[in-house]
Image (cartoon, grey):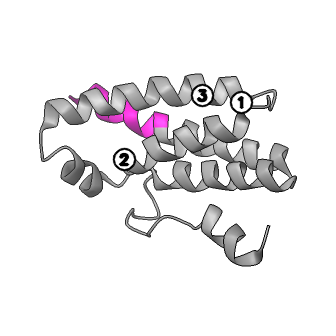
């Protein structure tokens, strides 16, 4: 893979989220047009999906890159940019044969942080 193509594969998300939060809530509000009920529904769906996808990737099956790609898109949609970036790094690591286990560990951590933030939000609702 050429260096230009490799950069495109795992280009980081824009730094929209505050560094101390796993979710960019302003982005979520924009994506849901300020509909609080839709925000809660989307967050709950993402929490369930991220759990399922990360679990499916644990043994690094052949479709790990595809699963990471799916999670990356979902994470960007709700403003979980750290999850999206970690999923992009895993996707790139799988495709290039780099350290996939380390990338998966980082993805698990980012997803757990996002789920904890989501749970806190859903409890307040």
Provide the residue designation for mark 2.
77
Q: Secondary structure at mark 1?
A: helix
Identify the magenta region: 115-125
Residue 9 location, quadrant: bottom right
The image position of residue 8, as x and y in percent, is: 61, 68
User: Residue 108, percent across and down?
Assistant: 66, 38
User: The residue tagged with tag 2: helix, strand or loop?
Assistant: helix
Query: Residue 34, percent across and down?
Result: 12, 46
Q: In the drawing, does residue 10 fall left or right of residue 20?
A: right
CA neighbours of label 2 inside 10 A, class few (<14), some (14 to 19), many (20+):
some
Q: Are marks 2 and 3 in contact (CB under 8 Å)?
A: no
Q: Residue at x 28, y 56 (%)?
A: 27
Q: Residue 57, which numbered label?
A: 1
Q: Is residue 116 magenta?
A: yes
Rounded to the nearest angstrom, the CA distance separating label 1 from label 3 is: 6 Å
User: For mark 3, what is the residue?
Assistant: 53
Measured in 3D between alpha carbons, the distance from the residue under mark 2 to the one under mark 3, in whole angstroms, is 16 Å
Q: Residue at x 72, y 55 (%)?
A: 92
Which SS does the magenta portion mostly show? helix
Give the SS element for disc 3: helix
| Quadrant for the N terminus in the image | bottom right
């Amino acid at each position: 893979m050429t260096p230009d193509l490799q950069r495109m594969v795992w280009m980081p998300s824009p730094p929209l989220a505050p560094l101390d939060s796993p979710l960019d809530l302003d982005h979520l509000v924009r994506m849901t047009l300020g509909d609080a009920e839709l925000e809660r529904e989307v967050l709950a769906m993402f929490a369930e999906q991220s759990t399922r996808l990360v679990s499916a990737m644990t043994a690094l099956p052949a479709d790990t890159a595809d699963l990471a790609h799916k999670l990356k898109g979902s994470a960007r949609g709700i403003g979980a940019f750290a999850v999206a970036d970690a999923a992009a790094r895993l996707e790139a690591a799988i495709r290039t044969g780099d350290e996939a286990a380390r990338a998966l560990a980082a993805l698990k951590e980012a997803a757990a942080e996002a789920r904890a933030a989501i749970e806190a939000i859903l409890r307040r609702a």
